[in-house]
Image (cartoon, rainbow, N blue to C red):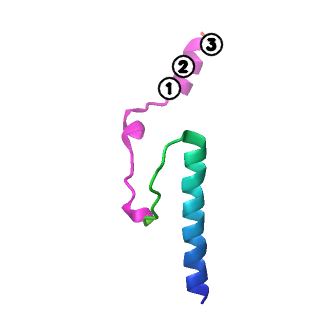
Amino acid sequence: EFVQASEALKADRIAGLGRALKDKTNVTMNIVEVPRAELPTFTYKARRWKDERLEGATSAGS
């Protein structure tokens, strides 16, 4: 019974999220639950990002 109630609650929350998105954006979206491992990871910004804060701080003070 607990699993069924949990699944029903999850389905209700997903449906509520879809309604909230529709209310805010006026676009209907199909919301589905997927395991975290199936989501893509993005490392593009990490690869192109260079932290120049220390370098900039020392040259700005000169």
Return the residue nearer the eye: 10 or 45: 10
**Residue 52 badge:** 1
The residue mark sitting in front, 3 or 2, is 2
User: Which numbered disc, 3 or 1, marks the residue that appears first in the sequence?
Assistant: 1
**C-alpha gap between disc 3 and disc 1:** 14 Å
Residue placed under numbered mark 3 in the picture? 61
Q: Are marks 2 and 1 in contact (CB under 8 Å)?
A: yes
Which residue corresponds to the image point at 59% horizontal and 13% vertical from the top-left? 60
Q: Are marks 3 and 1 in contact (CB under 8 Å)?
A: no
Crowding at dot 1, Cα within 10 Å, few <14 / some 14-19 / many 20+, comes out as few
- Judge from the rendering whether residue 42 lies leftward or rightward of residue 15; answer left or right: left
Q: Position of residue 8 (x, y in %)?
A: 57, 76
**C-alpha gap between disc 2 and disc 1:** 6 Å
Quarter of the image where the C terminus is located: top right
Q: Are marks 3 and 2 in contact (CB under 8 Å)?
A: no
* Magenta span: 36-61
Q: Position of residue 40 (x, y in %)?
A: 37, 53
Residue type highlighted by circle 3: Gly
User: Which numbered disc, 3 or 2, marks the residue that appears first in the sequence?
Assistant: 2
Q: Is residue 9 magenta?
A: no
Which residue corresponds to the image point at 37% horizontal and 39% vertical from the top-left? 44
- Judge from the rendering whether residue 54 lies leftward or rightward of residue 45; answer left or right: right
Which residue corresponds to the image point at 57% horizontal and 70% vertical from the top-left? 10
